Amino acid sequence: MDYSAVRIREENILALRLFLLEGPEAWVPLQDKIQKDDETAAGYMSLLHGAFNVAVHRRFAPTYTAGEIVRFVADLRIKVEEDARLINTLVAEDMIRRAVDAPPLKDGGPDDVESVLHSQVFILLYLVAEADFDRAGLEQFIEDATSYTQKWLAAQRDRSAGVIGQESP
Amino acid sequence: MPITDEHVAVLRAQLAGNREEHLRLMGQLDSDEANVYYTALVAAAFIEAAERHFIEDGKTADESNVIDFVAQVRERSDESSEIVNPQIAESMILDLLGKGTMVDADADTKFGHQIVLLAALVGEEQFTSAELDAFLLRARSLADELLG
């Protein structure tokens, strides 16, 4: 992935707001736009990743226990009823642990894109529903998510530059 | 060979929380007794305990009760959240209740999960000594059936 070409644009922020208000269905009409190329898709997915991290941080940092993470994922799976089977418990717990810089699980479950994305989306939407944002609260959350994502992308670019630098003679 | 008093005593010590006695008695079993008879007794006790917990007046608990129970076991400590694989634990119970299929796991992993879940189920019952004996008697009878 060429992170130097990934930018968070207004259309990404608009899409995140739609996603948070209406759920994943809101992105169905955007499929062609999102999948234009890897860098465009990364703009949308990076912002979703950023929103997930900010939401998890707000919920669990600075203090949490492993037991609270276990209970949170169990309550989420109970809440979504039939869709519980879409959420791999270990994947979901491991993603939350990583977001709060906790030691990852020894067995973090499968790492396929589908398992990770399902967990990320269900956790994010559950946390947003739990937060019960008013209009200003939602805008602040989106702003925090955007800021987090821009820093995260900058770190990815630095890392890529470092790797390329190391490869140079 | 049927389940013996010695096999039951090993499990009783474990479920009563007497770890030293459990290990001492376990050490007295030969490998065949440990691998075949004690394993069958644990499996039978797990079935008894799970049915007692999840089936009430002929009504089987739903999946959310199973998710909640396994989370209760795992949220107790960092160690238990790592030891108990939720997918394996939930599928073992759901399979038993006729509401799902057991996921693939090797025999040692299944046995380990049965022991942890059994201990948790029995712990919740808060059996008196006489009730624990009665529970083990039923498990022994079922284990004899399983061994055919």
Image (cartoon, coloured by chain):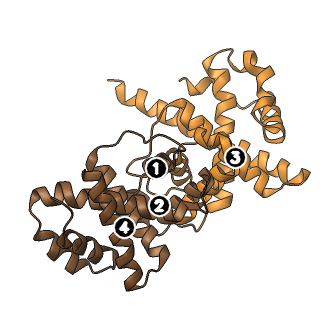
Residues under numbered marks 1 and 2 in contact, where contact means CB atoms less than 8 Å apart: yes
Which chain does the residue under circle 3 lie in? A
> Mark 2 highlights which residue?
B50
**Amino acid beneath label 3:** Val
Mark toward the start of the polypeptide (2 vs 4): 2
Mark toward the start of the polypeptide (1 vs 4): 1
Residues under numbered marks 3 and 4 in contact, where contact means CB atoms less than 8 Å apart: no
> Mark 3 highlights which residue?
A80
> Mark 4 highlights which residue?
B138
Residues under numbered marks 2 and 3 in contact, where contact means CB atoms less than 8 Å apart: no
> What is the spatial separation of the Cα atoms under label 1 and label 2, in whole angstroms?
8 Å
The answer to whether A83 is drawn above or below residue A61 in the figure is above
**Mark 1 vs mark 4: in front:** 4
The answer to whether A21 is drawn above or below residue B35 in the figure is above
- Of all residues shown, which one is farthest toward the right? A135
**Mark 3 vs mark 1: in front:** 1
Image position, residue A146 (x, y; %): 73, 42
- Of all residues shown, which one is farthest toward the bottom? B129
> Mark 1 highlights which residue?
B96
Q: Which chain is brown?
A: B
**Mark 2 vs mark 3: in front:** 2
Q: Which chain is orange?
A: A
Image position, residue A56 (x, y; %): 64, 54
